[in-house]
Image (cartoon, grey):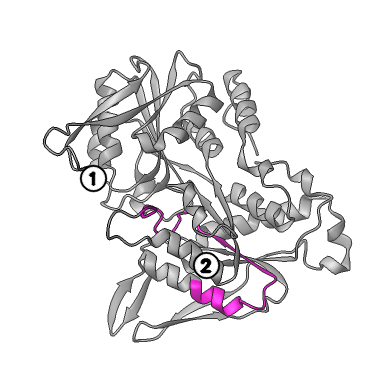
Amino acid sequence: MPDLHMLETAIPVASLKLIVMDSAVRLGENVNNHLVTFRKNIKNLAKSDHAFKGYAADSYLLNATCYRFGSGEGKAMISESVRGADLFILTDVCNHSISYTMNGYTNYKSPDDHYQDLKRVIAAVNGKAHRINVIMPFLYEGRQFKRNCRESLDCAYAIEELNNMGVSNLITFDAHDPSIQNAAPLCGFDNFTPPYQFIRALLATEDHLLINKDHLVVISPDAGGLNRAIYFANVLGVNTGMFYKRRNYSQHPETDTAQGVKEFLGDSVDGKDVILIDDIIDTGSSILETARLLRAMNAKSVYICGTFGLFSQGLNLFDEAYEKCYFDKVVTTNLTYRIPELYERPYYVEADMSKFLASIIDFMNHDSSMSNVYTPTEKIQEFLARYNNRENSCEINE
């Protein structure tokens, strides 16, 4: 958490309003509650200035709905005024539990449906709100960030489209490839990562871990996530490593279709605890295979951390791997929808991001430097110092 006292002398851009799409209701309510608490506790001159009426409010939520006709067509309806507001719109494009009726059949919203609803809301408030900011934790089509041959470039087109619709800032988390922001260079693009929340959540349940180079290592399951693992390892003060595919190009020397075998590059994990970190847990087959390999290398324990826990094929693979002791815990954030069964699993740990997200909104509404929010290195190290000294290690209020 950044230091909110830095906002005491800052002036808000405009009155704060938050639209939470139906895909992110639970997260949005928690974010709103934190914002209310922040504003009531902060000593800011805007609280007593009539020019900033509503600075400290009981709620910042603004009522908006996306109605569906029987044919499946839709429209957005905003039931309150947004004129002059600094508007933040929160959506979760991965929530597959939201349904609607089309021609008598029940359909569940896909990422495309959620993205279309987002555009409807933007169209409804455009020209009225002072500024429009979109919070899309899982970046829509973020895995289609580059084009090979005759492929669509969906993520880049979406960012450009939102910019053309009047979105000033796009806030996302752990983008699969942050360079995708180059698709709209004049649009604000903020990409945050959750290492601090991962550490707090993990150490709250595993209080026996020793955070040093002799006992812990951070591993990336592939070369693409190495930078993520390096940063995580650096703030923890431990070593890192990665798996990569050694490919045999003798049969296909000019293509990327050559078969590969996973190889490990890094220090020995023999007898050490391992944090296996990635951005997305989709089917889970790849990261569970990596966990199996780490166990075969005599890793003491394996903790899987993924920003987005999609579990698109259910939990059977994870249940089987857990029974075989391939891993000890799975930690994901609450930035996206998770299937209800996940909460019943003994291996699941949630890293709550709502307070962090509320602080991002608060800083952005004050036009304060986001560098105070981006890198929580000092916060992590302070937390680890208290943890290593076992001073209320897992009961630290932030």
Please determine whether, in this image, residue 161 is positioned above or below residue 346.
below
Which residue is denoted by mark 1 in the rendering?
A: 316
Left or right of residue 366: residue 78: left
* Span of residues in magenta: 119-146
Residue in the image at 75% along x and 62% along y? 13
**Callout 1 crowding tier (Cα within 10 Å): few <14, some 14–19, many ≥20:** few
Q: Where does residue 285 sit, x and y in percent of width and height?
A: 25, 41
Question: Which image quarter: residue 167?
Answer: bottom right
Q: Is residue 124 magenta?
A: yes
Question: Which image quarter: residue 272?
Answer: top left
Residue in the image at 33% along x and 15% along y? 270
Q: Where does residue 41 sit, x and y in percent of width and height?
A: 78, 50
Pick the front one: 274 or 205: 274
Left or right of residue 33: residue 231: left
Which residue is denoted by mark 2 in the rendering?
A: 162
Pick the front one: 189 or 323: 189
Residue in the image at 53% along x and 60% along y? 184
Residue 186 image label: none
Question: Which image quarter: residue 379?
Answer: top right
Query: Which quarter of the image is occupied by the C terminus?
Result: top right
Pick the front one: 267 or 206: 267
